[in-house]
């Protein structure tokens, strides 16, 4: 079972910023595209952003221009810089491989709450 540890969430006012971090085993980073998923009030998780093994990135429409995904392979850490946060960005954020069909387990996630 792969250990994924997310951190960096918190309570922030609308317009503020947060940087999320995710650590995973070294082989995990080197062999997989990875992404950040957001879970809202239900069980459904939306894929917010992706970074592949050659550092190409993708962003969901609402995240484009506000969020930046990047990784530090030497530190086995994935990041999500979130700027200009909106209340609709609230949720629990998880990192994991992409596509979701490859996922075998989830970390505990990190909670983001954006107040108006």
Image (spheres, rainbow, N blue to C red):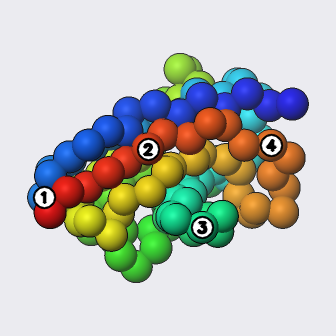
SS for tag 4?
loop
Q: Which residue is mark 3?
A: 42
Mark 2 and mark 4 lie on one chain; the one further toward the N terminus is: 4
Residue at left offset 45%, top offset 68%:
59
- Frontmost of labels 1 and 3 is 3
Q: How far across and how far down the image is residue 10, in percent? A: 32, 39
- Left/right placement of residue 69 relative to residue 101 reads left
Q: Which circle's residue, 1 or 3, is located before the other in the chain?
A: 1
- State the mark number for residue 105: 4
The residue tagged 1 is: 15
Of marks 3 and 2, the one in the foreground: 3
Horizontal side of residue 114 vs 70, given as left or right = left
Distance CA(mark 1)–CA(mark 3): 25 Å
- Quarter-of-image position of residue 28: top right
Q: Is residue 19 above or below residue 102?
A: above
Q: Is residue 72 left or right of residue 108?
A: left
User: Nearer the N terminus, badge 2 or badge 1?
Assistant: 1
- Which label's residue is closer to the chain start, 3 or 2? 3
How far apart are the two marked residues, 4 and 3, measured between alpha carbons? 18 Å
Q: Is residue 66 left or right of residue 26?
A: left
Of the image marks 1 and 4, the number of the one nearer the N terminus: 1
The residue closer to the viewer here, 6 or 49, is 6
Relative to 95, is 88 above or below?
below
Q: Assess disc 2: are there few (<14), some (14-19) or many (≥20) residues with their C-alpha within 10 Å of its C-alpha.
A: some
Rendering coords of residue 35 (x, y %) = 59, 54
Mark 1, residues whose alpha carbon is within 10 Å: few (<14), some, or many (≥20)? Answer: some
| Residue on which disc 2 sits | 111
Callout in the foreground (4, 3): 3
Q: Residue sitting at 48 percent across and 40 percent down?
A: 110
Q: CA–CA distance between discs 3 and 2?
A: 14 Å
Residue 9 place in picture, x, y as percent: 37, 39
């Amino acid at each position: 079972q792969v250990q994924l540890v997310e951190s960096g969430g918190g309570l922030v006012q609308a317009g503020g910023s947060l940087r999320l971090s995710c650590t995973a085993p070294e082989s995990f980073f080197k062999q997989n595209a990875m992404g950040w998923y957001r879970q809202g009030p239900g069980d459904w998780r939306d894929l917010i952003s992706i970074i592949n093994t050659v550092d190409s990135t993708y962003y969901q429409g609402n995240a484009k221009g506000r969020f930046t995904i990047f990784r530090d392979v030497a530190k086995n850490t994935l990041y999500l810089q979130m700027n200009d946060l909106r209340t609709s960005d609230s949720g629990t954020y998880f990192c994991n491989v992409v596509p979701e069909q490859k996922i075998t387990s989830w970390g505990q996630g990190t909670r983001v709450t954006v107040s108006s």
